[in-house]
Image: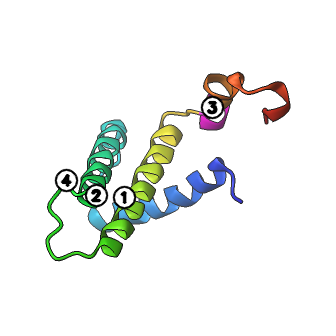
Amino acid sequence: MASLAELADRVERVSAIYAERCNINRDADWYALKLQEEAGELVAEYLRGSGRGRTGDRSPEAIRTALENEAADLMAQLLLFCRNNAIDVEAALDRKWFVYLPESDRP
């Protein structure tokens, strides 16, 4: 399994291709605003899948696939945001979350 840093490197390569193709300036605001955009898209798919959003003619399987894809988009954007802001998310998880685990379960 790839580390978060390795995933972030791969996501960055894809994002750079996207930015070049679409002539997008990925400034600090772009990284933050894209998080909000992708979170909104994830929630919209969640609402569709839970019967609280318009589904159109999409099947439950198509909605589930869209939910999974939006989760991937949000995760990728979070990795990009962390990379752009020099956040070591693995260290932050250790400090903020994993401190509550028993010593034997900590990385």
Question: In this orientation, which residue lies closer to the viewer: 74 or 82?
Answer: 74
Between the residue at mark 3 and the residue at mark 2, the CA separation in whole angstroms equals 27 Å
Q: Of marks 3 and 2, which one's residue comes earlier in the chain? A: 2
Question: In this orientation, which residue lies closer to the viewer: 105 or 38?
Answer: 105
Q: Which residue is mark 3?
A: 93
**Which quarter shows the C terminus?**
top right
SS type, badge 3: helix
Q: Which residue is mark 2?
A: 45
Residue in the image at 32% along x and 46% along y: 39
SS type, badge 1: helix
For discs 4 and 1, the disc positioned in front in the rendered view: 4
Q: Is residue 27 above or below residue 22?
A: above
> In the image, what residue type sits under mark 2?
Glu
Between the residue at mark 1 and the residue at mark 3, the CA separation in whole angstroms equals 22 Å
Proximity of marks 3 and 2: CB atoms separated by less than 8 Å: no
Mark on residue 52?
A: 4
> In the image, what residue type sits under mark 4?
Arg
For discs 2 and 4, the disc positioned in front in the rendered view: 4
Q: Of marks 2 and 4, which one's residue comes earlier in the chain? A: 2
Q: Residues within 10 Å of mark 4 (few under 14, many from 20)?
A: few
For discs 3 and 2, the disc positioned in front in the rendered view: 2
**Quadrant hosting residue 89:** top right
For residue 106, side relative to residue 43 (left or right): right
Q: Which residue is mark 1?
A: 70
| Residue range corresponding to the magenta coloring | 88-92
> In the image, what residue type sits under mark 3?
Leu
Q: Residues within 10 Å of mark 2 (few under 14, many from 20)?
A: many
Between the residue at mark 2 and the residue at mark 4, the CA separation in whole angstroms equals 10 Å
Residue in the image at 70% along x and 23% along y: 99
> Percent from the top left, x then y, of residue 51?
22, 58
